Image (cartoon, rainbow, N blue to C red):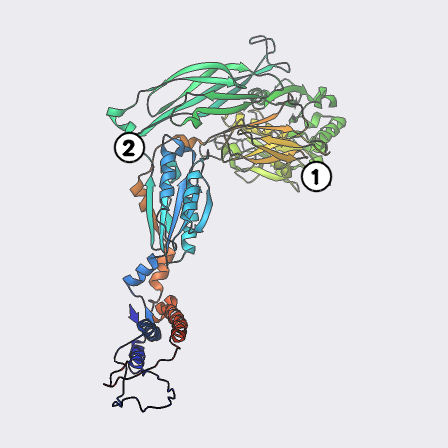
Amino acid sequence: MGLLAPLFLLGLAAVAVPVIIHMRLRHRSRMVPFPSLMFISRAPYRSVRRRRLRDLLLLALRCLALALLAVAFARPLFQGDAAANAAAANRLTVVLLDNSFSMGFGGRWQRATSAAASAFDGMSAVDRGALIVYSDQAAMVAAPTADGALLATLARETELVPRATSLLPAIQVARGVLADAGSAAARELVIVSDFQRSSWAPDNVAALPQGVELRLVDVRSEEEDEVNAAVTDVVLDHARMPSGGAGAGEAGEGARERVGIAARVSYQGVGAAADPERAPEPLRAEVDLLFDGEVIQTRAVELPLDSSTMVSFAPEVLERERTTRGTVRLREDALATDNEFHFVLSPAHEVGVLVIEPGGGRRRSRYLEEALSLGRRPFLRVNRVQASGFQPAMLEGKSVVVINDSAQQLPAAADAAVVRFVREGGGLLIGVERGLNSTSALLGEFGVESTQQVDRLAGTPGALAWFDTGHPVFDVFAAARSGDFSSASFFRYHRLETPEGAMPIALFDDGAPALLDLMPARAEDGVADAASGRAGRVLVLPTSFDTFWNTLPLQAVFLPFVHRSMEYLAGYALPRSWYRVGEVASVELPGTVGSEGDGYISVAPSGRERRLGTGGGDLLLDVEEPGFYDFREVRADVTSERLTLAANVPVSESDLGGLDVDEFASRIRPDQAEDAAASLATPVTAEEREQRQRLWWYLIAAAATILVAEGLFGNRRRRATAAPVVTAWSPTGEET
């Protein structure tokens, strides 16, 4: 305790004033006229003073009020440990409660909710607490409040969610709450979690405000054998088979589809399970394959600890135009949520492709057709025709047309049919090998011209120097070691002029376009340009599709390049067979009649329904539960086909491996910005500290309260003693 103006303590001498007044207070007698004193003995008169104090409580109140006023004018303040102890009386406790999917293992969740609730025990009237629950996202359940019972109840009522875990966003949310409390209060951050390894990246670092106390509550138990079996992935292999069965001929329009299914099963253990004396037995279980809730196949699996394997099922034939809900199911264990893996099987779409090649003895489209025949998602139904035999009716049912060095042989009527096909939404791939003089009728419609034919037979052959990995044709090559185009040699090609509105998506080493996208605006949306009438997509390759001018067809990248080109030109998007909880799913809903009562309803795996409105189109849905989401029209018959979406828990949550808690705590450091500010700031003076504490205000308020009480008590005392006092003396002079 310190004083800014200690000389004002001399005012404490004023406390003696009430004492002196009480000591010198005389008895006030009242003179009463008396008719005669002849019969009363005379006695000597003497002055009688008060020799003792009376009304001690009134005296004490007056003295205390004067003392408080004197101390208030001296401007007291807390310093050092006293200030810290005063601040500690106001405490803020922030609890981070992990409610991710892995917390459901064994008895972790019961221990976690109990620990979170107990963190709010013993809160005083000036203390506050806050509750934040987190998985891969953090949510404030209760803002700072002094109601500890409410906080404990909310902690016990928190429910698990089937989501992944991320500690860093949760700590950042808690940091904001702690920073808002300021440095005047004692602050504590309590993290209740199983501290799963996947929840914290090795390079993560979190910052907390200065002075925050960190307490970690690890709900893992050394007595539990933390082993977990899970189905973590499913691989689907689609193939076409003739309608009459296997071996009945080549797959065609009447072919049916069959799918091979393989599931990855993992078996992992941590903690006590790693002890050789307590090592669990290998996993011996049965894995079921279910279609629409019915067990179709069963496979046995035996798996040692800390390993995984693929369990393959026999191929199943899919029904046409029907969506099948599939599930791979493993036996239950201490964490049963990841024992099921859901997926949706729907017949693959067919994309009709027409290849137009020039006449003659050389088959120029052999490599291209072989690559197209291997397409599976989607299936590519390929028809080949020579330019001389082309008829516009051949475009019916086709999504993509490939003109392989044959544009110069097409008649004018065929050119017009191809242009109309593109403007109506079709895709066109043009390969140019010979001179462009005779092809101006078709390519001129799209503004394509060639300045010269580049011949690099004698010197160093050309190479592909750049391609746009952000374009749908090349996005599969964005990852490292996903494909090498540099090994392809180009001996001849045309130097094309890029028309207005077009975009080169690949370049040769001399800067010439290696692949032109004539309508790049169609890459993201399928809306036709009303001004130009263009609605399709056109790619131009200024070289051949065979090995006559280049070696590209001999490279491993040729197959995925051709498939991605067909998918882009056809506007095909591979449907997702499943999503993970936490992702955003895109659901395409057919358009509905805009009348009252129409629209769609989504039904979550838990049965929760949601009205989606009356219009069709793409719907973005937050996937929040594992299982199957159904989408049905409001007025649809219950037996009608419904759209279905499959969702599974995050695969990272199946690995129960934990963090080193001490190492994790070392990654949570004081805020460096606050450290820098503290080092540059001027030390707080006694005057500034006294202005912040303002203790004098409380002392004056207390003195005023005491003076009011003294006034009330004094008035009441005077009323009680208002009756006259008669003093008489005996003949001996004694007062009676």
Q: CA distance from mark 2 to mark 1?
A: 66 Å
Q: Residue at x 65, y 19 (%)?
A: 383
On-image quarter of the N terminus: bottom left
Looking at this view, name the residue that lies furthest to the front: 39
Judged by depth in the image, the label closer to the viewer, 2 or 1, is 2
Q: Secondary structure at mark 1?
A: loop
User: In front: 312, or 134?
Assistant: 134
Contact, mark 2 vs mark 1 (Cβ under 8 Å): no
Q: Position of residue 686 (x, y in %)?
A: 33, 70
Tell me if 408 is positioned left or right of 551 in this view.
Answer: right
Q: Which mark is residue 529?
A: 1
User: In front: 76, or 727?
Assistant: 727
Instruction: Residue type at mark 2: give it.
Output: Glu
Q: Is residue 463 above or below residue 45?
A: above
On-image quarter of the C terminus: bottom left
Which badge, 2 or 1, is on the more N-terminal residue? 2
Q: Position of residue 711 (x, y in %)?
A: 40, 74
* Residue position marked by numbered label 2 in the rendering: 222
Q: Is residue 313 above or below residue 489?
A: above
Q: Residue at x 33, y 90 (%)?
A: 37
Q: Secondary structure at mark 2?
A: loop
Among the 4 quarters of the image, the one containing residue 396: top right
Tell me if 687 is positioned left or right of 610 in this view.
Answer: left
Q: Position of residue 135 (x, y in %)?
A: 44, 39
Among the 4 quarters of the image, the one containing residue 434: top right
Q: Residue at x 38, y 57 (%)?
A: 673
Instruction: Residue type at mark 1: give it.
Output: Asp
Q: Quick one: label 1, few (<14), some, or many (20+) residues within 10 Å? A: few
